[in-house]
Image (cartoon, grey):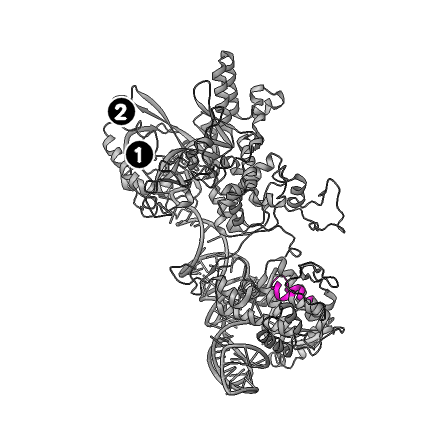
Amino acid sequence: FKRQIQSLGFSYDWSRELATTDPDYFQWTQWIFLKLYNSYFDPIWNKAMPIALLEDVFLENPKRKSEWKKNSRLIEVNKIFQRHAKEKNADELIKMRRDFVNGSRLAYVTEAPVWWCEQLGTVLANEEVIDGKSEVGGFPVVRKPMRQWMLRITSYAEKLLADLDTIDWTDSLKEMQRNWIGRSEGARVSFDVSITKQENSQLDRDTKLLIEVFTTRPDTLFGATYLVVAPESIWVHKLTTDAQRVHVEAYITAVAKKSDLERTELAKDKTGVFTGVYAVNPVNSEKIPVWIADYVLASYGTGAIMAVPAHDTRDFEFAKKFNLPIVQVVQPNDPKIDWQGFIGDGVAINSGSISGLSTAEAKKKIVEWLESKWLGKKTINYKLRDWLFSRQRYWGEPFPIVWKIGPDGESYHEALPESSLPVLPPTLEDYKPTATGEPPLARAKNWVNLPDGSVRETNTMPQWAGSCWYYLRYLDAKNSAAFVGSEVENYWMSGGVKSLNGGIVKSEANSTIQPFNNSTKPGVDLYVGGTEHAVLHLLYARFWHKVLFDLGYVSTPEPFFKLVNQGIILGEDGQKMSKSRGNVVNPDDVLGEYGSDAFRLYEMFMGPLEMVKPWNTKGVEGVYRFLGRVWRLFVDEKSETEFEQAETTAETQKRGELVDLVKLNPAIKDVAATPAQLKTLHACIKKVTEDLDGLRFNTAISAMMVFVNDAITWETKPISILREFLILLQPFAPHIAEELWFKVQSPKSKVITPNDKPTLDIGHETLDLSYQPWPKFDAALLVENEIEIPVQVNGKLRDVIKVSATATQADLEKAAKNSEKVKPFIEGKTIKKIIVVPKKMVNLIVVE
RNA sequence: GCGCGCGUGGUGGAAUUGGCAGACACGCCAGACUUAGGAUCUGGUUCCGCAAGGAUUAGAGGUUCAAGUCCUCUCGCGCGCACCA
């Protein structure tokens, strides 16, 4: 494989091991975290930028000023900053700058809801919660807000989505990532709400609010007959009248008790409650009621929707249940379709100035109108959320961060200098989670409190941190100056052949590392892993890699060029292996009975790599038999009997001496191969070579079986042919191939004993089969003089004729018509047409 | 519900750009060697039929000289997302 597939192979699980034990990994993972911490996402350049550049805003860098102006948020911040600058309140300025910088960092701190398990007394990561219960113990969990570190992966949503088109992953996997990112284009629209003090006595004055909604169908705005706010919204209490308060509070309490499952699929029946207040639809000034319902999610969009019951299934169900008005605003293009509940595109009606426009045009027109009136804005919304990056566990990289108290008395965080890395966790008596949810590291007071009065961050990073970049460290694992040397990185990841060694281009001839062939592919050539990583690991790693790319530390925008999901192996009953089902196959048992060659060979032979396949122990016996045939192809069976006897009688015999007792098959001779033998070999070389490139191991093995089934019948077996075959076999069954290679290479060579040091060269012969050059197949040897051509009459096979490979179209026609088997089918009939596909087939079209 | 993928002998699968369906194995049947066979070797094995021949790639229809392969619909299975506005 090393030779055949010139790609980089890594182990994801190994990285997890390293990430929790290896100071080297701690150091460089923390180093990368600092890069994230000291960077922000620049919406103008659409990439990560060091914080230093962000400060240009405040320094009024003229070069960038015109670019800044294109982004309203930054203009706004800049203006506020300038206004405050005139007031010359230095403390406030510092605080403001700090807040803004913090608010723009790729790594930032915020209050975020985390899973809290009362019984275990621990905070759980998402992956430790299954169906609303803890993975350990199955205890109930609740959402509890806690201060957490977040990574701003959402700022990369667009890039993560767009660049999927540049990489060679399966469609289903790309689709999973697309769904996870969940991009949708639409608009934010503001609805005015007025609530008087009389209606809501909790307000200290008459209040005007804006309810902002996100919609992908702004063209249906005229059909919005009510608004719905998520029950979790912080605005709910302000939006409730005294008259409705009892009902609203009862509803919110009921919703809080529902599990996620009850809120979704089991709850086909819509529930909700009227708040008592009304909003104004900006397009027609109609008063529409504001409801609270749990079919609206607080976490998506703005947490509020405009309901268009005529053209949205959920709103339609809700409106029917609560007798809310349903107004048609889209006419389906097919008049037979009922407009009620029609969610497709059509023509706008009952919609004022946009009536008569197609859905696409209506969207465009209405958004332009909303923007001109400052009532709405074209918006792209994503399902992707920022990544909650802190864990309250012992195992994991501590954050290289300290907390300090500012002059204003408020605490703020600051990065430790790179020279203080790695930050290793303190030794603890008790490293289990604490009962308060505080991280275990907080127990080590001496470690936490620094001499200058600052306090260490005690959260740790999740295991994802190491797996986000381990493939880069593998390129240059011993580099103590950088997480990966740039030249090494460029060599492997960009496929360049440049200057691996101090700027000197190595010639291909004396380089031990062969350059990639015409490779312009970005990143790791081949990454094999399970689908369980489809949306977490593979998205996180892409994100980190893109940040490192933007900051100039890596040379490719994508980490993994080609990704293959190996299918899982099911139990013999076709069910997923599990202890409870009792259908687990223990690899050690198989290895013990059949050996690792047979085990490996069988796993490759079962079927396509990507496919989910059931295990079948009988199948292992099949490939085991194949290996037996390979063995007998090479060795003299009589000598093998002697070997077996020797092995049982002379226990003290060294293994190597016994090996030498087994003699080569006497049919193996150092003679020239016949053309037929060469053809068999080269057909095998061609198939195995091509199939390895395509990862079609099952058919490659089948080709080798065909070769052996043929070669075993040869009276004389040319040694040159068998040697080439062993090179083909080596990647699949290295042990037996290596042992047989020893025999065919040097049948009377020095006996190797277990005491001999393993070397590539034992003095007279090169023994390491895996360093042999891969055979090249010779197409000329595969050319047939005579070929078999199927002859069809009216598309039905009637005969297979043998013709010269150089036969012309006319020859083929003639031969086909003369075939004895074909004649009965064409006699007495008119040949209307003859299709001749050269070297492939002949089809005679006849009529009565 | 939405999205993606897949349906080929008794079984795993092969047929890479439409061109001999069932490669290679497992299993089964028969035979050889053998005291013995859970070793090895030989032959057979999609279905119907003595045969000639016919049928056949989940089902139905279509395009084509030619369809497992392309198109449409239906059914079944798997995976992912799941009230995402």
- The residue range painted magenta reads A724-738
Q: Which residue is mark 1?
A: A291
User: Is A449 rendered above or below residue B56?
Assistant: above
The amino acid type of the residue labelled 2 equals: Asn
A841 relative to A542 in the view: left or right: right
A216 relative to A436 in the view: left or right: right
- For numbered disc 2, what is the local secondary structure? loop
Residue A831 can be seen in this image: no
Looking at the rendering, in which quadrant would you find the N terminus of chain A?
bottom right
Neighbour class for label 1 at 10 Å: few (<14), some, many (≥20)?
many
Task: Name which quarter of the figure residue A541 lies in.
Answer: top right
Q: Chain of mark 1?
A: A
Residue A2 horizontal/vertical position (percent): 65, 55
A153 relative to A494 in the view: left or right: left
The amino acid type of the residue labelled 1 equals: Trp
Q: Chain of mark 2?
A: A
